Image (tube, rainbow, N blue to C red):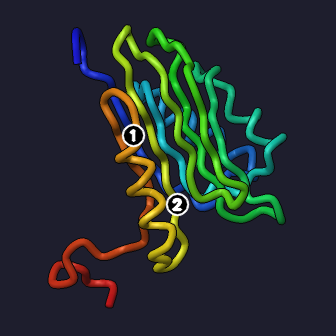
């Protein structure tokens, strides 16, 4: 990418309904100078995601679970970088959000994923999203999969 690198952070927040917890997470993102943040398991409804537009993050893109406070992903883009929104794709299950835009003039696609359990259909769908994307593609999130079973101590 041209110029300075973009600071990315990904957190599985396990719910941000609590205002104190939400404030602490946003403060940490600000302290770490995150410019793009991927949040998984937000547990917020479509209308509640506006609560994430604080502490220097006015651009919030989200996917919420339609039937209650479960799942949910969000991509927050800091006010400190030049962002031009081009397109957005989300599912109604709160499992992924894909946004395409220009960051500091370079076309980029961000995909944030939360996959509860091992669902190979969703993995294929996410792979297809990545393949059919524009510009530099960055995919982050919680795939709930062991990349190296020998190193995984959770059993």
Horizontally, residue 118 falls left or right of residue 65, namely left
Secondary structure under tag 1 reads strand
Earlier in the chain: of badge 2 and badge 1, it is 1
Q: Please, which residue is most extreme toward the bottom here?
A: 155
The residue labelled by disc 2 is 114
Residue 146 sits in quarter: bottom left
- On the image, the x and y values in percent for residue 143 come to 42, 65
Secondary structure under tag 2 reads strand
- On the image, the x and y values in percent for residue 15 come to 66, 58
- Quarter in which the C terminus is drawn: bottom left
In the image, which is nearer the foreground, mark 2 or mark 1? Answer: 2
3D distance between C-alphas at marks 2 and 1: 15 Å
- Quarter in which the N terminus is drawn: top left
Give the class, few, some or many, for how many residues have Cα within 10 Å of label 2's Cα (few <14, many ≥20). many
Tell me the residue at 74%/59% (across/down): 65
Tell me the residue at 43%/67% (across/down): 123
- On the image, the x and y values in percent for residue 70 come to 71, 65
Please determine whether, in this image, residue 120 is positioned above or below residue 88.
below
Q: Please, which residue is most extreme toward the left here?
A: 150
- Most foreground residue, 94 or 5: 94
The residue labelled by disc 1 is 9
Which mark is on residue 102?
A: none
- On the image, the x and y values in percent for residue 144 come to 42, 71
Figure label count: 2
- Most foreground residue, 70 or 122: 122
Tell me the residue at 55%/72% (across/down): 116
Tell me the residue at 45%/76% (across/down): 120
Horizontally, residue 62 falls left or right of residue 85, namely right
Give the class, few, some or many, for how many residues have Cα within 10 Å of label 1's Cα (few <14, many ≥20). some
Please determine whether, in this image, residue 98 is positioned above or below residue 122.
above
């Amino acid at each position: 990418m041209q110029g300075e690198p973009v600071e990315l952070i990904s957190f599985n927040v396990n719910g941000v309904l609590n205002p104190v917890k939400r404030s602490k997470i946003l403060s940490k993102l600000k302290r770490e100078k995150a410019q793009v943040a991927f949040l998984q398991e937000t547990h917020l409804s479509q209308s509640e995601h506006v609560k994430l537009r604080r502490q220097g993050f006015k651009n919030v893109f989200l996917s919420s679970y339609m039937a209650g406070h479960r799942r949910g992903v969000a991509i927050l883009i800091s006010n400190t970088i030049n962002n031009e929104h081009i397109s957005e794709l989300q599912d109604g299950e709160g499992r992924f959000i894909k946004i395409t835009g220009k960051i500091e003039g370079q076309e980029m696609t961000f995909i944030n994923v939360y996959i509860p359990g091992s669902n190979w259909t969703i993995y294929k769908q996410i792979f297809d999203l990545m393949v059919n994307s524009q510009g530099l593609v960055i995919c982050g999130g919680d795939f709930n999969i062991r990349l190296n079973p020998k190193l995984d101590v959770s059993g």
